[in-house]
Image (spheres, grey):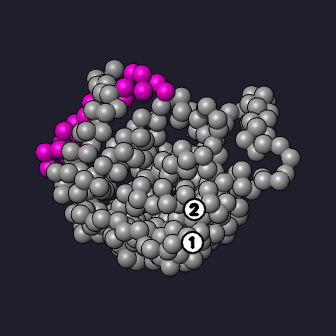
Amino acid sequence: MSETTTLTIAAVQERVEAIFRRAGLNAVQAGALARVIVAGERDACKSHGIYRIEGALRTVKAGKVKPDATPELLPQEGSAIVKVNAMGGFANPAFELGLPVLAERARTLGLAALVINDCTHFSALWPEAEGLTDMGLAGLVMCPSYATVAPTGGNKPLLGTNPFAFAWPREGRPPYVFDFATSVAARGEIELHRRAGKPLPEGWAIDASGNPTTDPDAALAGAMLPFGGHKGSAIGTMIELLAGIMIGDLTSPEVLDYLGTTTLAPFHGELIIAFSPEAFAAGRPGNPFDRAEVLFDAILGQGARLPSQRRFAARAKSEVDGITLTAAEMEQLERLHTL
Ligand code: NDP
Ligand code: PYC
């Protein structure tokens, strides 16, 4: 059995943040980035954990993201649309800046949207989704990526893996959250299979000639497939429209043209929509949160699990036992710290 090291969540945060600071990121960028990466490790979401540090650093080195950016909140007093310009930095600090204003507007107006423009986004969306439920709000989060997914019936990369998350707050329990790529799997999963020398499951990808493949290299050179056939293809397209074109930011094909590669983190925008369930349900019978619990109980009552249940169980364990890293992951952290 290979050697492992267990560190507290705070110790991993300190190490990851130090790596980003040494690489020239300002405190605002480094802190927010380290928080989402460490949250990924804490919640056993390896495809968006410390494995992502190298990609973020490569993107900084390539000059495609500004390590010293300070996000700016655009003045739109009272509007349901809250806009934050990430100023060419990462999306995560821009979200942290916009969230309190978004929450205040959603509570006042019943719903509000946060538009983040000019950002690099490489992380999972559930940290943003949970930011909403922490404020007692439900919400949707989405962003494009870069062209790596063929639309159903097509054979070339066009759509992104376009992640989509939803969250609903629950009293005294972890929220209901789902968060997934609109491709069969996140691109990070293909890369992790390649690194582990493992074949992909059938139905994930096609090669450069449009034939089905289970070879991760052939998949990376070809195209990934949308989840659920035409349904995932349409949802991926909706995300290009709402979180690309509608917010005046790049679509996945435009991101690929801009970057010229999928080895750097994508530069585009992000859309977060927050709802106040109380405001929507006002004047109608029943408390929306109590009614939601009835639905969740019925799902669980059939022996099904709720999305994020695995993740929250991993989080509860990490909070007690710490985060266990492999020797290769520890070596990666040491190496990146001395770059
Ligand atoms: P997964 O298929 O691993 O998981 C998707 C969701 O489904 C999770 O909420 C998961 O909960 C839930 N789930 C899984 N199995 C079950 C089950 N049996 N019953 C109920 N719920 C279940 O996600 P993807 O691989 O598609 O995406 C992984 C991550 O990659 C996401 O966080 C996404 O945001 C991110 N991503 C980011 C991109 C970007 O551009 N920034 C692009 C693409 C993806 P649980 O976690 O508890 O298992
Ligand atoms: O895993 O598909 C992915 C991904 C793309 C950009 C960030 N994550």
Q: Kindly indicate the quadrant of the structure image that contains residue 118.
A: bottom left
Q: Give coordinates of residue 156: x percent, y percent.
A: 54, 71
Magenta segment boundaries in residue numbering? 316-339
Q: Kindly indicate the quadrant of the structure image that contains residue 110.
A: bottom right
Q: Kindly tell me whether residue 109 is visible in this rendering.
A: yes
Q: Nearer the viewer, residue 29 or 260?
A: 29
Image point 74% across, 56% down: which residue? Answer: 280
Q: Badge 2 is on which residue?
A: 105
Seen in the picture, residue 185 relative to 220 is either above or below; the reply is above
Residue 102 horizontal side relative to residue 281, left or right: left
Q: Is mark 1 within 8 Å of ligand 1?
A: no
Image point 29% across, 69% down: which residue? Answer: 64
Give how far apart the Cα atoms at labels 2 and 1 are.
Answer: 7 Å
Residue 153 horizontal side relative to residue 258, left or right: right
Inspect the image, locate mark 2, and give the three-letter code of the amino acid beneath it.
Arg
Q: Give coordinates of residue 68: x percent, y percent.
A: 24, 63
- Tell me the SS state at disc 2: helix
Q: Kindly tell me whether residue 187 is visible in this rendering.
A: no
Q: Is 323 part of what is drawn in magenta?
A: yes
Inspect the image, locate mark 1, and give the three-letter code of the amino acid beneath it.
Ser
Q: Is 269 part of what is drawn in magenta?
A: no
Earlier-in-chain disc, 2 versus 1: 1
Q: Badge 1 is on which residue?
A: 79
Please, which residue is most extreme toward the right here? 285
Crowding at dot 1, Cα within 10 Å, few <14 / some 14-19 / many 20+, comes out as: some
Name the chief secondary structure element in magenta.
helix
Q: Nearer the viewer, residue 338 or 269?
A: 269
Q: Quadrant of the N terminus?
A: top left
